[in-house]
Image: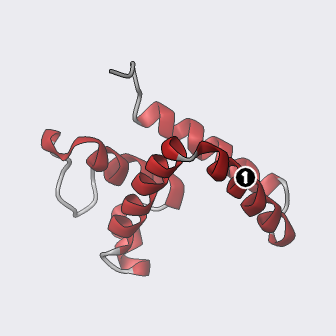
Amino acid sequence: MTDGHRQKDADDGPPGDIYWNAVPIWCELSHDELAERLGEEYACGFAYGFERALIMAMLKPEWVQAFYHRLRAYYLTTHTEEDLHDWESCAEETTQAIPMTGVS
């Protein structure tokens, strides 16, 4: 990582993977750019929310899917359908940045 923040430690675990890898993908900014534009806490808050959303998706998948469709419909009132293609590319990039090999 080239930004001025601390390098990822092996002990950071999955939350660290989200912070270091997923945040820049979904926010489309480096950690330094996020800190400059939105404050030092933004990336941490985003990572925490992303982590909790994953937990919610596993515990209540039907609710999350219904809410996703509601959120998508809302976004389509303020964005074009093509804008929402970014979600899929961010999801694909995230799966490449944090590969999973199996569940134990």
Locate residue 57, reporting x and y percent.
Answer: 54, 46
Mark 1 = which residue? 66
- Rendered location of residue 59, percent (x, y): 49, 44
Q: Is residue 65 visible?
A: yes
Instruction: Quadrant for the C terminus, please.
Output: top left
Residue at image coords 49%, 40%: 94
Q: Nearer the viewer, residue 52 or 13?
A: 52
Q: Position of residue 30 (x, y in %)?
A: 40, 60
Question: Which type of secondary structure does the marked residue at label 1 adopt?
Answer: helix
Give the camera-side residue of 77 and 56: 56
* Residue at x-position 19% and y-position 46%: 12
Residue 65 position in % (x across, y down): 68, 48
49 relative position to 69: left or right:
left
Q: Is residue 99 left or right of residue 72?
A: left
Q: Height in image: 72 above or below 62? A: below
Kindly indicate the quadrant of the structure image that contains residue 88: top right
Colour scheme used in the picture? Answer: secondary structure
Image vertical order of residue 30 relative to residue 77, above or below? above
The answer to whether any part of residue 28 appears in the image is no
Residue sitting nearer the eye, 101 or 58 = 58
Residue found 52% across the figure and 55% down from its top: 26
Picture mark count: 1
- Please say if 69 is above or below 92: below
Q: Residue at x 56, y 47 (%)?
A: 60
Q: Residues within 10 Å of mark 1 (few under 14, many from 20)?
A: few
Q: Disc 1 residue type? A: Ala
